[in-house]
Amino acid sequence: MAELGLRDTHGILDRPWVRPERTSAGLGWEHLYLSSQRELPYRDAFDGARSHLLILHLNGPVTVSRGRRGLTDARRIPPGGLFLHPADTELDVELGGRLDTVHVYLADEALQAAAGDAGGRRVRLVEEFGVTDPLLEQLVRALEGVVRDWEPGAVTYADQLATMIAGQLARHHSIHRPAPPTARGLTERQFAAVRELLDTRLAEPLPLADLAAAAHLSVSQFARGFKARTGLPPHRYLMRLRVEQAVRLLRTTTMPISEVAARCGFSHQEHLTRVLRARLGTTPGALRRGE
């Protein structure tokens, strides 16, 4: 599947009143597109898009009016407020003031997969604006932080955040809310296959989809099953493996620190140093000296 991008959105971000700061363009994300920007006041109408739209208001309050084929509702939305619009749905909107936002566009297949077993019924999101959801806000802010400080090795973490956003939308912002899926741990065979892939590709960016494929599961099923088995989400488990391997190499070899970083999946030596300081309270040089 091709990367999700501007062609999959309503076109709001192409308008002259938008001042973009950063986007996920070029990162290869197939099911999610993120953009953060300053928006100036405007009024416009848009056709339905292929993707679901979630907007997080970073400041405010600001008055927003919305509807379909005409404005029918207006609300004053505070910082942290959310604007949710389903795919394939027309949108008329008016923004009453300057606003900093994060837009997240989510492919429908990711939403349906995250819902798990919904009794054979497709999940349909509700049209909402002005609502708050602290977990969803936290996930969007975390994903925006991944884009802002992008490291190729963070791809597993980005995939995990996207899966969690899709799951939260399906369970708490849909018309017919599916029951929370039962988390069953990976079998011995599944975990062995995943662990082999983790060890083999420790130095590479490792998409969640590749790990799920090794277990013959969907991404959402895999994420739940992996955490049920290990107690950790995949990106944290992978980072633990990378840190453990880096510590071994620093203590038992004379390999240059920059090469240790590369072999263990860190973007550069400073990335390794930052992670070791945060997790272990030490540095590569101190570990090498036996401190």
Image (spheres, grey):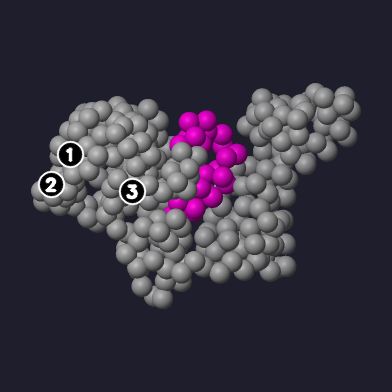
Which residue in the structure is indicated by mark 2? 71
Q: Are marks 1 and 2 in contact (CB under 8 Å)?
A: yes
Q: Amino acid at mark 3?
A: Val
Alpha carbon of mark 3 to alpha carbon of mark 2: how far? Answer: 18 Å
Instruction: Check if residue 151 falls in the magenta segment.
Output: yes
Quadrant in the rendering for residue 285? top right
Q: Which residues are magenta?
A: 143-166
Q: Amino acid at mark 1?
A: Glu
Mark 3, other Cα within 10 Å: few <14 / some 14–19 / many ≥20: few
Q: Amino acid at mark 2?
A: Leu
Mark 1, other Cα within 10 Å: few <14 / some 14–19 / many ≥20: some
**Residue sitting nearer the eye, 222 or 63:** 63
Quick check: 216 above or below 40?
Answer: below
Alpha carbon of mark 1 to alpha carbon of mark 2: how far? Answer: 8 Å
Residue at image point 32% right, 37% down: 78
**Residue sitting nearer the eye, 87 or 38:** 38
* Whole-percent x, y for residue 24 in the image: 42, 38
Nearer the N terminus, badge 3 or badge 1? 1
Determine which of the numbered discs, if any, sits on residue 94 in the image: 1
Which residue in the structure is indicated by mark 3? 131
Residue at image point 52% right, 30% down: 149
Total numbered badges shown on the rendered structure: 3
Residue at image point 11% right, 51% down: 69
